[in-house]
Amino acid sequence: MRLCSFLSDGLTHVGVVDADDSVIDITRLSGSHTDDLPLTMSGWVELGINGIERLRQICEQNGSDHVVGKVGDLELVAPMGRLPRNVICVGVNYREHIEESERAVGEIEVPDVPVYFTKDVRSICGPFDDIASDDRISTQLDWEVELAVIIGRGGRGIRSVDALEHVFGYAVLNDVSARDVQLSRNQWWKGKSIEGSSPLGPFVVTRDEIPDPQDLELRCWVDGVEKQRSRTNLMIHDVAALISDLSRTLTLEPGDVISTGTPAGVGLARTPQEWLRPGSVLESEITGLGRQRNRIIELGE
């Protein structure tokens, strides 16, 4: 299923997007049931794998009575709202991205184990939100399209062979980065946590729709010009390996988001270097997960 969050009378509702792009209002549908069903996306994610089947059941039973229109006519917001915990990000997870980054910042060792950092939850914005640029903070905003993995079943010490069974769904995330902040005194968290800078969505696509997360194409455009194009099978550490590795040291919980790294094509590594500026239009897409479109604006515009 493709799940989205949209505004209705000023409130956030959860929707299931059908094949014809019509949207079933799950929040209203849940409210009409006598059993206690979630009213938010985070609530459904917390139900985990069982939540996917329950969603399917109620859509088949009464979904046609709660269609609110086409997805393109709705105001979509970040699908999970404010995340319960920081986004767990993976650095240098595509070999070609390492090679291009070396040309810009010097030698980078190819990691034999995953490299992690986090993004603050306040950095997440909606898939079609404007992204504010403030030259007092950064003049080097860069794009990084990534596959985001939403955990739906918690666990510690998860085996790689079982790891994908712990996934609720997948989404597009652009890890927009302030390179001048990030590379100044190694401020990765700060440089990647500018408030409202990193779009997530438009959809959370449940795991049953994505049988192999290592068989997806990632693409990113700036002002209609393609900047990144790669495939997830080129990750150094694949989704299952990341889930397993993280779970060795911490208990993963439903709602945790893992952003799996960006491929080659970022602005930092271009000659001359390129940056997002007010007026730029950033678009990001992954096979089957939808396409974002975000305009860069001057702060206060």
Image (cartoon, rainbow, N blue to C red):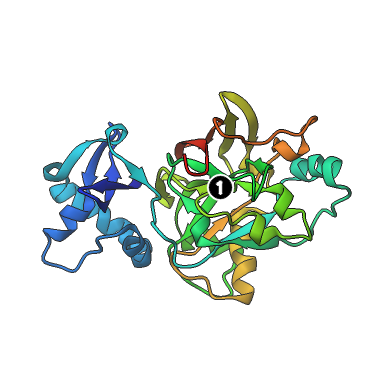
78 left or right, relative to 28: right
* Residue at the image position 14 percent from the left and 50 percent from the top: 61
Side of 20 where 120 appears, left or right: right
Residue at (31, 32) in percent of width and height: 72
Circle 1 SS class: strand
Q: Is residue 241 visible?
A: no
Say which quarter of the image contains residue 277.
top right
Question: Which residue shows up at 59% across the image and 48% down it?
Answer: 175
Q: Residue at x 15, y 68 (%)?
A: 35
Q: Nearer the viewer, residue 76 or 207?
A: 76
- Residue 115 on image: x %, y %: 72, 61
Q: Which residue is mark 1?
A: 147
Residue sitting farthest toward the right: 107
Image x and y of residue 71, in percent:
29, 36
- Residue 43 in the image: above or below residue 70: below
The tally of labels here is 1
- Return the x and y of residue 89 as percentages of the image width and height: 62, 58
> Does residue 186 show up?
yes
Q: Is residue 123 above or below residue 201?
A: below
Residues 291 and 195: in front is 195
Q: Position of residue 231 (x, y in %)?
A: 63, 38
Tell me the crowding category of disc 1: few under 14, some 14 to 19, or many 20 or more residues within 10 angstroms, Cα based.
many
Q: Amino acid at mark 1?
A: Leu
In the image, farthest residue toward the top: 224
Q: Who is closer to the viewer here, 43 or 129?
A: 129
Q: Quadrant of residue 234?
A: top right
